[in-house]
Image (spheres, helix red, strand yellow):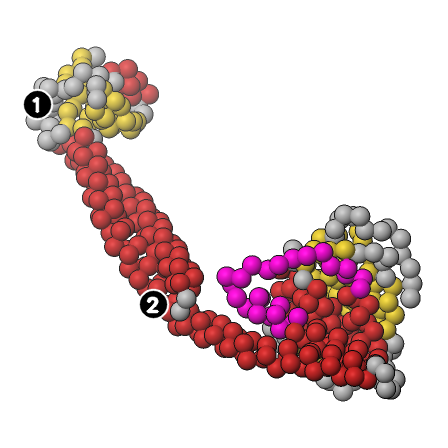
């Protein structure tokens, strides 16, 4: 495994660890919230029980339960338990309760403490029980501190375990990717020499036959195809190496499309109409763009009923290449995964065949992405249209011609 692969694996494991830590944090926060809600509900019930007991047993104000004070209004005189904190009771509420016979529960703050006050009418007067909520606040604070401590202590181990598990989970995939890259690199290395020899021998044949027979056209095509094969192989090797930097240069897209159309016309009986733009320049790899256009045209020819139309134009700052066939179209359910590798869908043909997309359209999508462009598909009852968009170089002509 290369150092780049190791670094990528470490970054992935780190991301998994961070995601695990975030998940643990969110889980702890949710559990803290649930625990606090349960505690608040329990404390509320306990406080209500304490207040109810104090009211039931309050014959006078001298011996209230611990943590409570009793205030009574009898015959216009207010009496309070010894030690009642200043401001904890509300005499106005007490007298109002005696007058309108209403019961009121409210929380009051006196000094730095909070109290729950229950006021009820009683025997021509009123009774008020004051409960100190300080103990409840202490319990909540301790619970929150404990949960925060446990969460903080468990956060780092959780992140470490997540990173370790992520690394273990990624190892088989990393090994498979490394094996794939080694295979592609080995295949490219072994094929480069025979392809170069093929190109060299074809050039020698070309030179030898120039003066003897009229076979130079075929030999020219052989040389061109060999050179194109070598360029495609080089482009494949660059695409397979994630560390490689693609070399982009100005490319005459019209020339690329014309060569692909010319080759396709010589290999098929399906009529191909080319509507070109006068001059369309893009920045990229000629070999890669040749592969993309070839794949689009091959797909259209294979599925066309009577013909294929190829249109090249410039729209604002984008070069647009449309490849349209009049075949059975594309099933709507296949459109979302049309550019996945080896995607297939049934056609509308009577024989119930399958419209094969294979690897070609997936490669077109990858090549378009490498060039900063996009590939889209539109289907109808009259066939399918694929549109390749690429950033156009400045200075493209705006006139079109038909050939």
Look at 33% across and 21% down and name the residue there.
100
**Front-most of 158 and 210?**
210
Q: Residue 355 appears at what percent x and percent y?
A: 71, 78
The local secondary structure at tag 1 comes to loop
Which residue in the rendered view is the most extreme toward the left? 63
Res. 17 in view: yes
Q: Residue 218 appears at what percent x and percent y?
A: 81, 82
Q: Is residue 96 above or below residue 230?
A: above
The local secondary structure at tag 2 comes to helix
Cα distance in 3D space between marks 2 and 1: 71 Å
Q: On the image, numbered disc 1 is attached to which residue? A: 62
Where does the N terminus fall, quadrant-wise? bottom left
In the figure, is residue 121 to the left or right of 338? left
At label 1, counting other C-alpha atoms closer than 10 Å, the crowd grade (few under 14, some 14-19, many 20 or more) is some
Look at 67% across and 66% down and name the residue there.
288
At label 2, counting other C-alpha atoms closer than 10 Å, the crowd grade (few under 14, some 14-19, many 20 or more) is few
Span shown in magenta: 231-255
**Front-most of 117 and 243?**
243
Look at 68% across and 79% down and name the residue there.
200
In the figure, is residue 329 to the left or right of 371? right
Q: Is residue 237 above or below residue 73?
A: below
Which residue in the rendered view is the most extreme toward the right? 402
Q: Residue 83 appears at what percent x and percent y?
A: 10, 19
Pointers 2 and 1 in contact (C-beta within 8 Å): no
Look at 71% across and 53% down and name the residue there.
391
**What mark, if any, has residue 168 been given in the picture?**
2
Front position among marks 2 and 1: 2
**Front-most of 61 and 340?**
340
Q: Is residue 155 magenta?
A: no
Of pointers 2 and 1, the one earlier in the residue sequence: 1
């Amino acid at each position: 495994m290369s150092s780049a692969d190791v670094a990528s694996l470490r970054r992935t494991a780190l991301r998994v660890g961070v995601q695990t830590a975030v998940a643990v944090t969110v889980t702890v926060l949710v559990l803290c919230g649930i625990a606090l809600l349960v505690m608040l509900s329990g404390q509320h019930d306990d406080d209500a029980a304490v207040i109810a007991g104090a009211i039931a047993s309050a014959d006078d104000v001298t011996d209230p339960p611990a943590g409570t004070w009793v205030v009574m209004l009898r015959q216009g005189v207010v009496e309070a338990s010894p030690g009642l904190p200043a401001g904890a009771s509300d005499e106005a509420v007490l007298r109002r309760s005696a007058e309108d016979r209403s019961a009121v529960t409210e929380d009051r703050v006196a000094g730095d403490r909070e109290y729950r006050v229950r006021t009820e009418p009683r025997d021509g007067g009123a009774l008020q029980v004051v409960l100190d909520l300080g103990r409840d606040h202490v319990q909540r604070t301790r619970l929150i501190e404990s949960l925060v401590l446990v969460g903080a202590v468990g956060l780092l181990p959780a992140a470490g375990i997540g990173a370790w598990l992520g690394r273990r989970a990624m190892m088989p995939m990393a090994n498979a990717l490394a094996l794939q890259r080694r295979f592609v690199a080995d295949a490219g290395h072994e094929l480069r020499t025979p392809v170069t020899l093929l190109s060299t021998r074809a050039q020698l044949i070309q030179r030898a036959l120039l003066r003897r027979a009229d076979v130079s056209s075929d030999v020219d095509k052989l040389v061109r195809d060999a050179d194109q094969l070598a360029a495609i192989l080089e482009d494949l090797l660059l695409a397979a190496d994630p560390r490689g930097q693609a070399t982009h240069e100005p490319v005459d897209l019209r020339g690329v499309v014309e060569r692909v159309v010319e080759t396709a016309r010589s290999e098929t009986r399906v009529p191909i109409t080319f509507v070109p733009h006068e001059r369309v320049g893009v920045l990229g790899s000629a070999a890669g763009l040749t592969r993309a256009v070839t794949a689009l045209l091959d797909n259209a020819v294979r599925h066309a009923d009577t013909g294929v139309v190829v249109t090249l134009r410039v729209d604002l700052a984008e070069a647009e290449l449309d490849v349209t066939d009049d075949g059975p179209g594309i099933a709507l359910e296949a459109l979302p995964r049309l550019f996945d590798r080896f995607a297939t869908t049934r056609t509308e043909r009577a024989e119930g065949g399958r419209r094969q997309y294979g690897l070609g359209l997936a490669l077109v999508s990858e090549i378009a992405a490498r060039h900063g462009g996009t590939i889209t598909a539109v289907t109808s009852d009259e066939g399918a249209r694929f549109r390749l968009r690429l950033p156009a170089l400045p200075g493209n002509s705006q006139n079109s011609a038909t050939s």
